[in-house]
């Protein structure tokens, strides 16, 4: 990045060795006049360009990033640019949610003989970046003092009703001989909290808790039980994680026994605790049809589930698992199954903000991050945690600097690694001890994936190929970059 003249901006270009780098060379040999803002990085193929390369450049001061490879069907490695096209298109849609203008990133195709075209591409992109001006720096972004939260109304009634606990216990009891364990929940530090629980013998069933305080997605523990026959209790959203793990062949169907029950909503325990305040003694916890009743230090508190549910529950259309071996009851049908998916509350909030406001939103929120990585550790689909790239020193993706930018970059890594895989279970956000609304990043990518790939929903079909693991020679919803 050194040697930038005063009227130049910092533009990074990743060019494939076999076509676009040759095209740039051809333009140079022909002495074509071109802007000089570009700093070229030669890569073997556009398929080698991880979207994180682009994000790293933009986070570290680039005003624009260009990726160029061989034309579709001309890739030296046959399909590298087909894969790249999907990933880079998703990335282009992802930038605005961080407050980055999507015009700062483009990808295109230039062959080795197209010197004239290279000149055109480079001139046009440079003009585009100059029109946008120097990129706003994350470190210089404003901080946001407050945002207006909208009241939520559920698309189907939320309740604290019966959980068929006795039938569930009886079913587990009958199957304990044939499985290594069954994953469920039990009371945690007090009657208000539940924790994940491994049921191995009949006596363990006495502690089983199933209901609106059973918030953990137990699919997160399935990989620890790989190779052992394991039963798992699931809500509708948890079951999608199980399906996604099956889809990615991280667990085997014959090893899993899925026991599903109709979820009627789960509590946002962080909000419950916040409004309950500190207490010395928890006297009683009970449920009515519609609310959680807590008596602490002699004082009664009522938490209606329609006001204290997790945000994902208001828009849930999958209250019952689509794939299960044993189902206990049936779920309510949502009033409108089609409408809600586009507007989860975290995302609706960000949609309403301008690009600078979004940058300010993330800067302000990430200042609270303590880098505990609970979001990563609670994610059922964060599968390479034994070699997480955020922990590596070679390459060194994230530093230990305690800055909002570094912390947000980790969220960018996590979100992009979950593109087309995240089932929206919300465990990342639920487990965040400081309540950062990081689910919005995953929801935004999920919405993009739906728009680009014919309504694709992760975790619904165990035989489907996740969109970013495949390609189509002719993409229906991705327009070719002709300029
Ligand atoms: Fe050029 Fe694959 S070799 S895009």
Image (spheres, rainbow, N blue to C red):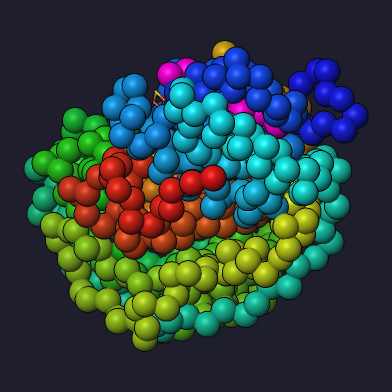
Viewer-proximal residue among 12 and 288:
12
Range of magenta residues: 11-18
Please state the horizontal and vertical placement of residue 406, each as a whole percent of the image: 70, 34
Left or right? Give the position of 365 relative to 420.
Answer: right
Any magenta on residue 12?
yes
Left or right? Give the position of 12 relative to 389.
Answer: right
Please state the horizontal and vertical placement of residue 411, each as a whole percent of the image: 59, 41
Figure quadrant, ligand 1: top left
- Residue 102 in sight: yes
Please state the horizontal and vertical placement of residue 85, each as a whole percent of the image: 42, 40
Left or right? Give the position of 12 relative to 313.
Answer: right
Q: For the C terminus, give its image quadrant.
A: top right
364 in relation to 178, above or below:
below
Kindly identify the residue that appears in the image at 45 percent across and 28 percent down.
111
Kindly identify the residue that appears in the image at 66 percent across and 19 percent down.
31
Please state the horizontal and vertical placement of residue 65, each as a whole percent of the image: 64, 35
Kindly identify the residue that appears in the image at 45 percent across and 64 percent down.
213
Kindly identify the residue that appears in the image at 17 percent across and 38 percent down.
252
């Amino acid at each position: 990045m050194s040697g930038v003249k005063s009227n130049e901006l910092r533009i990074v270009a990743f060019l494939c060795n076999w076509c676009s780098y040759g095209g740039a060379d051809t333009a140079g040999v022909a002495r074509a006049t071109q802007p000089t803002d570009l700093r070229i990085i030669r890569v073997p193929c556009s398929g080698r360009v991880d979207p994180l390369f682009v994000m790293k450049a933009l986070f570290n001061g680039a005003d624009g990033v260009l990726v160029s490879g061989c034309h579709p069907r001309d890739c030296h490695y046959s399909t590298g640019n087909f894969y790249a096209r999907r990933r880079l298109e998703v990335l282009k849609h992802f930038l605005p949610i961080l407050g980055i203008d999507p015009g700062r990133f483009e990808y295109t195709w230039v062959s080795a003989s197209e010197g004239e075209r290279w000149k055109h591409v480079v001139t046009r992109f440079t003009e585009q970046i100059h029109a946008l001006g120097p990129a706003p720096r994350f470190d210089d972004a404003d901080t946001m003092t407050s945002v207006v939260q909208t009241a939520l109304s559920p698309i189907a009634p939320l309740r604290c009703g019966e959980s068929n606990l006795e039938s569930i216990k009886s079913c587990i009891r009958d199957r304990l001989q044939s499985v290594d364990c069954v994953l469920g929940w039990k009371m945690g530090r007090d009657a208000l909290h539940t924790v994940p629980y491994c049921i191995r013998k009949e006596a363990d069933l006495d502690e089983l808790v199933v209901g609106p305080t059973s918030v953990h997605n137990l699919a997160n523990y399935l990989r620890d039980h790989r190779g052992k026959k394991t039963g798992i209790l699931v809500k509708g959203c948890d079951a999608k994680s199980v399906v996604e793990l099956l889809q990615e062949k991280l667990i085997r169907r014959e090893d899993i026994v899925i026991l599903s029950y109709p979820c009627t909503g789960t509590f946002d325990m962080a909000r419950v605790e916040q409004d309950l305040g500190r207490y010395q003694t928890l006297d009683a916890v009970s449920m009515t049809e519609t609310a959680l009743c807590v008596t602490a230090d002699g004082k009664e508190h009522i938490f209606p589930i329609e006001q204290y549910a997790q945000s994902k529950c208001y828009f849930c259309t999958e209250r019952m698992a689509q794939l299960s071996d044993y189902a206990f009851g049936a779920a309510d049908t949502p009033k409108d199954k089609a409408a809600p998916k586009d507007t989860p509350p975290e995302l609706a909030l960000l949609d309403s903000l301008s690009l600078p406001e979004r940058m300010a939103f993330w800067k302000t929120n990430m200042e609270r991050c303590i880098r505990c990585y609970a979001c990563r550790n609670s994610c059922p689909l964060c599968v390479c945690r034994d070699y997480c790239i955020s922990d590596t020193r070679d390459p060194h993706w994230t530093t230990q600097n305690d800055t909002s930018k570094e912390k947000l970059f980790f969220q960018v890594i996590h979100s992009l690694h979950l593109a087309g895989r995240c089932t929206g279970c919300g465990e990342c956000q639920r487990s965040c001890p400081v309540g950062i609304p990081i689910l919005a990043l995953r929801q935004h990518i999920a919405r993009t994936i739906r728009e680009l790939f014919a309504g694709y929903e992760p975790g619904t079909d165990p035989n489907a190929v996740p969109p970013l693991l495949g390609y189509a020679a002719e993409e229906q919803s991705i327009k070719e970059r002709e300029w």
